[in-house]
Amino acid sequence: MDLSTTYMGLKLKSPLVVGACAPLTEDIDNIKRMEDAGAAAVVLHSFFEEQLQKERLELHHHLTHGTESFPEALTYFPEYSIFHIGEEEYLNHIRKAKETTDIPIIASLNGYDLGGWLEYAKAIEQAGADALELNIYFVPTDMNQTGAQVEQTYIDIVKAVREEIKIPLAVKVSPFFSNMANMAKRLTDAGANALVLFNRFYQPDIDLDNLEVVPHLLLSTPQAMRLPLRWIAILYGRLQVDFAATGGIHHGHDVIKMVMVGANVAMIVSTLLRHGIEYLKHIELQMLQWMEENEYESIAQMRGSMSQLNCPDESAFERAQYLKAIQTYHPVWDKRV
Ligand SMILES: Cc1cc2nc3c(=O)[nH]c(=O)nc-3n(C[C@H](O)[C@H](O)[C@H](O)COP(=O)(O)O)c2cc1C
């Protein structure tokens, strides 16, 4: 059975890729365990624009005010005390991950605007990363900023990074655009080699005991995969770009579905946080079993077979399917059905 695939020109032994996640990839031993459990590539946890800003602010204050006024300066960025690694440490982490494993290591840079932090992409390339995933995470709240302006920021960031580096560039975005298809095309034209669909915006919660807004992170459920599944199906074959699916991929069957709609790779996070890194072996086994039972010999053979272009019913991914779904739904307690 041939599970091999390609992703942005990288040859991978399977579509199973561990997605960006600090608790999973901060430890080099874990990255080695991922390789041993069957990961075809690993995306490192993100290095954040704010981390770089914090370091540069610290340096600036040391140089201009002396160290005694420094604690005061840091109060402008109280929340940034959460960062446990700096820019040099992140680069060392890439080097160590490369020395320890034989699988591609994809670094991740996470930010929201044009600025000096984008130059850091070059340092990531020089540290030996096989590719860069750029996570643009931006929650616009300015009522005077138009959607077109927000979209242009994404495009400008991608173009700026593309100019900095030669390694493959993946762009991870959220689905919150008026026309995702247009945005996918513009990101591709701006130089993205892959689209990572989709970024999940973590929604804050309210702690009723302390009356505080808290960043309560929820792991995904399998329902989350429907959105990337739909969009990869719609976009596959229409753009010169690869696709990574992320969100709700928990089982071997989920990976197969994503490949069938056109994904080159499936990124897995929540289910490894729940069940452990070795669960990757189980996912691979489920894929192999399904392929054997259904007489598939390779990933290449199934890729895109259920995309919109190859689907007998083109409307299946669009509005018609929504009408059908809500018109034919019956509650389980409805005795008439
Ligand atoms: C604890 C945790 C940390 C994460 N850290 C990052 C990160 O550093 N950068 C990033 O792009 N995505 C990050 N993500 C998002 C994941 O890469 C992934 O896109 C998302 O969790 C959906 O996949 P899943 O359903 O398999 O969890 C993180 C997710 C979790 C749960």
Image (cartoon, rainbow, N blue to C red):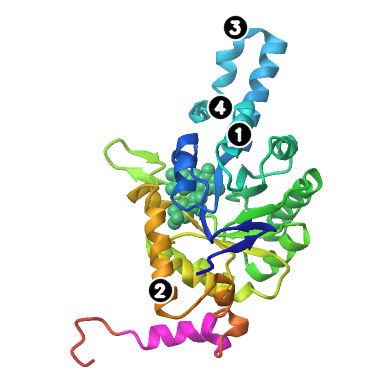
For disc 3, the marked residue is 68
Q: Secondary structure at mark 1?
A: helix
Whole-number angstrom distance, CA of label 3 to CA of label 4: 17 Å
Identity of the residue drawn at 66% across and 42% down: 129
Precedes in sequence: disc 1 or disc 2: 1
Q: Which mark is residue 50?
A: 1
Q: Quadrant of residue 175?
A: bottom right
Residue 154 % position (x, y): 70, 53
Position of 301 relative to 13 (above/below): below
Crowd class of label 1 (few under 14; some 14 to 19; many from 20; radius 10 Å): some
Q: Secondary structure at mark 2?
A: helix
Q: Secondary structure at mark 3?
A: helix
Give the left or right position of residue 231, taking residue 186 as reference. Answer: left
For disc 2, the marked residue is 290
Disc 3 residue type? Glu
Quadrant containing the C terminus is: bottom left
Whole-number angstrom distance, CA of label 4 to CA of label 1: 9 Å
